[in-house]
């Protein structure tokens, strides 16, 4: 790597080559409240040092505050209106089917990772959940030393598909469980091992929010997780990497005093008002990992499939206690910079302590037994930390302090903004 190399242009933004490896970590569900708690306790020495010596702000993530939209915003350096991934599901109005949005063919534009890989960089993308892997790895040529796999399927990786044979054996650890903090820690350990093996320019390490869904910032398991993270961030820095930390979204407690989830069953309300089949509520949080949130989040979409108009739907539910906003498609796209062709007719966002579901009978809450519901999706979970372990140059210092940063500007700040 040298400064003379021409900048890499991805989706219209010019990125400088880094002068040393850059390790970006997406702490899934890493609400600023966790850092606040554990930094105050002095439990996170490495993160504290990064914040003191480098750059730290609370940035604005993509709304809906879900995993896929935010990972794609960050990795493409664009808002969702450009990259097109605005949830885990949208409704295909032609077929009436809910379509999963994790396919790389639905991602518009290129990733910064692909841009650098094509220009000759060695790129690593590791994610906890396999559902993210294909979009993160879109266009990434793994035949040239680039690596892309998930810890969920670390035992099944091949050189041909992932750029590495048997990642489990490479890292030297047993397969972490799907619902465990180790699934996230493995991502970091694999990144550390690859960095130790040398010649890695960009590392994109995306964790899972299992711990944050389950434990609040005051709980010991959350502290233990963050201490394990901090230790690994320290190791990445020790190996010479610029460490860049953010979250895809925050996390809020959405249960009542009795410990039951505060849910607005929106499909049931709309069915009672307009009749069954007239409207269709899609919960874009839905994925294969529902045990810790029961597919309940703070943001849902309503498609009008019958007689009811968007204006009537809005009229029927606006003002319901627990709803922060009820918006038509145009307002939602304008406010949150979302792709109109994948937006519902009505967008419904709950307040911080309430979530929205579809029909009560369709949500399996058995995985929540014994735990308070903690989840995300709304604007109240869209505040995320953005920390860079090195100081910024003058221009970026000014920009970083002038207004609210969007987390999708992360690569701009990490690559163009770091002082040399
Ligand atoms: Zn997430």
Image (spheres, rainbow, N blue to C red):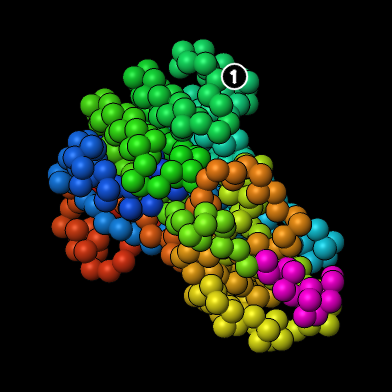
| Foreground residue among 283 and 360 | 360
Instruction: State the predominant SS element of the stretch in magenta.
Output: helix
Q: Residue at x 70, y 49 (%)?
A: 364
Tell me residue 134's x, y (percent).
Answer: 61, 39
Q: Quadrant of residue 12?
A: bottom left
| Foreground residue among 265 and 53 | 265
Q: Does the rendering let one see residue 3?
A: no
Q: Is residue 214 above or below residue 149?
A: below
- The number of numbered badges drawn on the structure is 1
Whether residue 150 sits left or right of residue 385 in the image: it is right
Q: Quadrant of residue 24?
A: top left
Q: Which residues are magenta?
A: 265-278
Determine crowd level at label 1: few under 14, some 14-19, many 20+ residues with C-alpha closer than 10 A.
some
Whether residue 227 sits left or right of residue 178 in the image: it is left
Tell me residue 399's x, y (percent).
Answer: 24, 64
Q: Is residue 28 above or below residue 124?
A: below
Whether residue 384 sits left or right of residue 151 in the image: it is left
Task: Name, please, the residue furthest toward the front.
Answer: 258
| Foreground residue among 242 and 299 | 299
Q: Report which residue position mark 1 lands on.
A: 155
Q: Residue at x 46, y 56 (%)?
A: 253
Judged from the image, the secondary structure of the residue bearing numbered disc 1 is helix
Tell me residue 348's x, y (percent).
Answer: 60, 72
């Amino acid at each position: 790597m040298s400064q003379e190399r021409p900048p890499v242009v991805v989706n219209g933004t010019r990125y400088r080559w880094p002068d040393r490896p850059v390790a970006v970590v997406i702490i899934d569900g890493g609400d600023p409240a966790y850092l606040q708690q554990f930094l105050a306790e002095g439990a996170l020495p490495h993160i504290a040092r990064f914040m003191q010596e480098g750059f730290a702000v609370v940035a604005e993530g993509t709304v809906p505050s879900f995993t896929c939209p935010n990972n794609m915003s960050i990795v493409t350096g664009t808002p969702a209106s450009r990259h097109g991934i605005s949830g885990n599901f949208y409704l295909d109005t032609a077929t009436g089917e809910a379509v999963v949005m994790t396919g790389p063919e639905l991602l518009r534009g290129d990733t910064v990772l692909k841009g650098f890989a094509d220009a000759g960089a060695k790129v690593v993308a590791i994610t906890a959940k396999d559902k993210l892997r294909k979009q993160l790895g879109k266009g990434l040529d793994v035949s040239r030393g680039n690596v892309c796999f998930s810890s969920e399927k670390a035992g099944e990786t091949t050189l041909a598909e992932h750029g590495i044979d048997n990642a489990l054996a490479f890292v030297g650890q047993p397969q972490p469980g799907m619902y465990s903090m180790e699934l996230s820690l493995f991502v970091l350990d694999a990144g550390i091992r690859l960095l130790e093996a040398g010649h890695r320019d960009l590392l994109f390490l995306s964790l899972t929010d299992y711990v944050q869904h389950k434990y609040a910032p005051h709980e010991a398991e959350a502290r233990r997780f963050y201490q394990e993270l901090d230790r690994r961030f320290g190791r990445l820095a020790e190996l010479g990497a610029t460490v860049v930390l953010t979250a895809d979204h925050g996390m809020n407690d959405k249960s009542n005093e009795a410990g039951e989830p505060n849910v607005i069953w929106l499909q049931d309300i709309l069915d009672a008002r307009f009749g069954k089949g007239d409207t269709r509520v899609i919960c874009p949080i839905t994925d294969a990992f529902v045990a810790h949130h029961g597919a309940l989040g703070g943001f849902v979409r309503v498609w009008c499939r019958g007689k009811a108009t968007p204006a009537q739907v809005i009229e029927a539910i606006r003002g319901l206690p627990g709803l922060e906003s009820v918006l038509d498609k145009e307002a939602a796209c304008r406010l949150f910079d979302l792709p109109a062709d994948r937006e519902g007719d009505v967008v419904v966002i709950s307040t911080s302590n309430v979530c929205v579901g579809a029909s009560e009978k369709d949500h399996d809450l058995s995985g929540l037994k014994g735990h308070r519901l903690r989840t995300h999706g709304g604007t109240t979970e869209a505040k995320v930390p953005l920390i860079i372990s090195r100081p910024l140059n003058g221009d970026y210092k000014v920009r970083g302090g002038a207004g609210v940063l969007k987390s999708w500007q992360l690569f701009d700040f990490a690559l163009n903004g770091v002082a040399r």
